[in-house]
Amino acid sequence: MITHSAYAVDPWCVRETALDWDVLAQSESVFTMSNGHIGWRGNLDEGEPHGLPGSYLNGVYEQHPLPYAEAGYGFPESGQTVINVTNGKLIRLLVDDEPFDLRYGRLLSHERVLDLRSGLLHRTCEWTSPVGKTVRVRSTRLVSFTQRAIAAIAYEVEPLEDEVQIVLQSELVANEQLPTPSGDPRVSAALESPLRPEENDARDMRLLLMHRTTASGLRVAAAADHMVHGPASTQTSAESGEDVARVTVITDLAPGEPLRVVKLVAYGWSGVRSLPALRAQVEAALAGARSTGWQGLVDQQRAFLDDFWEHADVEVDGDVEIQQAVRFALYHVIQAAVRAEQRAIPAKGLTGSGYDGHAFWDTEIFVLPLLTFIHPNCVAEALLWRQHTLPAGRARARQLGLKGAAFPWRTIDGAECSSYWPAGTAALHINADIAHAVIRYVSLTGDVEFERETAVELLVETARMWHSLGHHDSLGRFHIDGVTGPDEYSAIADDNTYTNLMAQENLRAAADTAERHPEQAATLGVDDEETAAWRDAAASMTVPYNSELRIHEQSADFTRHQVWDFASTGPDDYPLMLHFPYGDLYRKQVIKQADLVLAMYLRGEAFEQEHKARNFAYYEALTVRDSSLSACVQAVIAAEVGHLSLAYDYLGEAALMDLDDLEKNTRDGLHIASLAGSWIALIAGFAGMRYREETLHFAPRLPENLSRLAFSVHARQRCLRVEVTDSSATYTLADGEPLEIGHYGEALTISRGNPQTRPVKRTTPLPEPAQPPGRRPGRPAPARPERAEAETGPG
């Protein structure tokens, strides 16, 4: 587990000041460099020791059979798992014939710094070999935001006391040996050496490896070039084989005399392009990077992030850990998305192989809302990927006996990969989640072309699925039965409130959008009768309510179930799904993650305020948070109904999920949705931001631990700057035409040069609702060391 002491608290970087073997894999996730197309885990340059080697290309996977004890109609036959592609990070080093291996000799110092402003990972290490030769190694690593196919390393070695002979081996390596990925031997067999060699080359200091996956048929190319700076006697050579290509550099160095090698790596992949075409693609990318040069790549990286932080930064005064964590979160979210370009944004981004590299509903409900407000181009690209996968969604719907399209619960290329029916196929709310992201993006950006060319099709096909899945009863009420909502401990339920309300929004938006774009709707076969049926279903949608308890039901008759025996459930029994049968969980009142509470956030207008407070209190006592997706949502509603201290604790849980390894699985990759959730908790929770009827509304309320919150959001081609203190909120228009907003229901017009300041209403602390025993949120202790230096903005 990563404790607080693993990383120093610093407002603009994540700094590891010692190498702790126990948390090596977690640190590899934390120090991942990515751009949404390439992902390089933060493995040590020399490759070993490692927790989990990882070099990923978004969309590159291998297929394998899905295991079933007994086959069933509609079960997906093949799974998809992200694979470790050609490793271009490797730089091995020998010092007077001794391998530079930190497990041997004496490690004098070791520091790694992820600089959130420059987008660089720095490493400095001093090491004495078993025979007493001491060297300093410095490296800097980047994955380019501006040149999509390029990653690069600047590596420098310098003897400190004696003259030494240095042998440096810069490699491309395919089919690295990995830890066993699964207990299923069929999966392990499919992923053992998944890349079949097709071509290799080594000329001068250029390397090339080309491979193809066996089952998925994807071709992968990796090329590298080198720039070597050392003594005049330095020698270089190159060689290649099927799975290894290597440049070797040999030189003698005097004390204080460095050898510096810059390594440029280009990646490409395709399911359709020929071997010559893909080879030419990576060679061209490499030529472009060499023309730019190392310093040019560094400068481009900084320029991109200067622009990003100017409009995306969140300033938090009063909690230095949260300040660091939210910037860490924003950095990794943009890393996961910015160059994904019509590919999925996986739940782990490209930071690890957790969840097999699959994308879930996490993207549309947690990640895309953040990106819509700070980097909307990424949202359009992610939703275009969903549109491209519609053929698979339509085929899946037909297989399930439904109309329209049924999007997969988990996938890489658009095909359903979930072999667990109750929490997979039955979680059809994914359709409405995608629709919600479409609706929000179109409304906030006014992107008419996207609405016409993409939104119409996505909304129509998702609405068709809902209308064919649901039914009207004898009283005309519309029901959606046999589904799983966000709470996977309550599967195959009738009239899940979250699902019904999100489907209602989907149906209405589909009808409205089809009427705005009749030509596009007509090409999909939409007519007036169909849109009227959607509106009728939406208007008569069932929302279960318990009049005795005066709360909304999570699903029909949920409150009739027996309450889980929390008193007999020990702290080591969580997560419950690993210690109790699902059948027991399904028939009890126990909640894995925010479900109805999430509905109150995303469809807040469907609930009266008094109902929100009662609902929150009731479901708070049942929610065990066996999912990283829950804390940020609970933070939002806790803040809205007046539990500011509790909301603050939930913010801490969401924000520090990976820096403190709260789920004990950061080794498998970061929790991208929870990272995005830290932004949601701050902006939707403590700034009280909601977007209704094409208007931004704010109801700010800070907990006593925070003295100031400042951020910017983009909406309707405007950039609004918001600054909240414990006494006032100031709204400043940074760019665009005048903007109408709401402040506690008061209409304000904000124009450039005319900021508006309004008082923040005092919140009377309410008695906190109870959580299940032992499940109250709280931060680990002791606190991480804080750097004694002043905070400065990006610049």
Image (cartoon, rainbow, N blue to C red):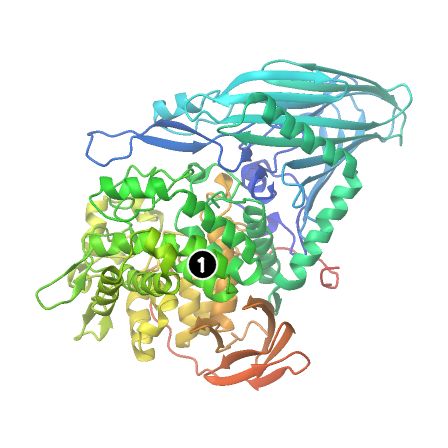
Q: Is residue 435 visible?
A: yes
SS category of the residue bearing label 1: helix
Q: Looking at the picture, which amino acid does disc 1 mark?
A: Glu
Left or right, 233 with respect to 530, comes to right
Left or right, 210 with respect to 62, comes to right
Q: Residue at x 52, y 60 (%)?
A: 372
Q: Residue at x 42, y 32 (%)?
A: 81
Instruction: Classify 10 Å Cα crowding around label 1: few (below 14), some (14-19), many (20 and above).
Output: many
- Considering the image in quadrants, where does the C terminus appear? bottom right
> Image quadrant of residue 493?
bottom left
Q: Residue at x 29, y 60 (%)?
A: 503
Residue 667, percent across and down?
Answer: 50, 40
Q: In this rendering, is residue 261 above or below 642?
A: above
Say which of 417 and 280 sits in front. Answer: 280
Say which of 115 and 539 sits in front. Answer: 539
Q: In this rendering, is residue 649 above or below 692?
A: above
Residue 116, percent across and down?
Answer: 67, 52
Q: Is residue 657 visible?
A: no
Left or right, 777 with respect to 407, comes to right
Residue 335, percent across and down?
Answer: 58, 47
Say which of 608 and 713 sits in front. Answer: 713
Q: Residue at x 39, y 60 (%)?
A: 436
Say which of 345 and 777 sits in front. Answer: 345
Residue 396, percent across and down?
Answer: 28, 41
Residue at the spot of label 1: 451
Left or right, 523 with respect to 48, comes to left
Image label count: 1
